[in-house]
Image (spheres, grey):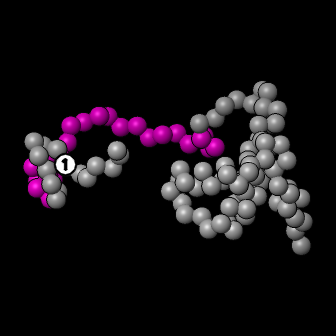
Amino acid sequence: MTQTDPRLAAPLEHGALDADVVRRTAQLARLALQPDEAHRYQADLGRILGYFQDLQDLDTTGVPPMVHPTDAAMPLREDEVRPGVDPQTILGQAPRAETGLFLVPRVVG
């Protein structure tokens, strides 16, 4: 039987999130929260931020930064020009194209 980490049951103590922050974060992420969900996510996000704080508190003096968790070497190859697809063929499949560009609906403002 495994023991439960006590932090899983405890909300974030320092820098606690309030329900307004959770609702605003959900709005920015374009998530629709039900009124009762804000409280639950408040505790969940608080615990997640608490784990990040635990990581911040670790002493990493003398630990070299790493790009990847394994020492796998990246295979390299020579750059070489290869034939591609004709741009007009690709643009011909688009719903709308003009002067060599894809035309898409406006998303922002």
Disc 1 packing (10 Å; few <14; some 14–19; many ≥20): some
**Quarter location, residue 92:** bottom left
The picture places residue 65, in percent across and down from the top left corner, at 66, 31
User: Would you say residue 8 sits in the magenta stretch?
Assistant: no
**Quarter location, residue 45:** bottom right
The picture places residue 10, in percent across and down from the top left corner, at 86, 57
User: Would you say residue 87 sits in the magenta stretch?
Assistant: yes
Residue sitting at the far top: 62
User: Mainly helix, strand or loop, the magenta region?
Assistant: loop
Determine whether 63 is above or below 13 in the image.
above
Q: Is residue 86 visible?
A: no
Please name whichever residue, 88 or 104, is drawn nearer the observer in this view of the structure. 104
Residue sitting at the far bottom: 1
Please name whichever residue, 10 or 85, is drawn nearer the observer in this view of the structure. 10
Span shown in magenta: 68-93
Left or right of 103? Residue 22 is right
Quadrant where the N terminus sits is bottom right
The amino acid type, in three-letter code, at marker 1 is Phe
Mark 1 = which residue?
102
**Quarter location, residue 52:** top right
Left or right of 45? Residue 107 is left
The picture places residue 14, in percent across and down from the top left corner, at 83, 43
Q: Identify the element where label 1 is drawn.
A: strand
Determine whether 70 is above or below 89 in the image.
above
Quadrant where the C terminus sits is top left
Please name whichever residue, 9 or 84, is drawn nearer the observer in this view of the structure. 9
The picture places residue 8, in percent across and down from the top left corner, at 82, 60
Please name whichever residue, 88 or 52, is drawn nearer the observer in this view of the structure. 52
Residue located at (65% from left, 66% from top)? 35
Determine whether 62 is above or below 19 in the image.
above
Residue located at (70% from left, 29% from top)? 64
Residue located at (78% from left, 47% from top)? 16
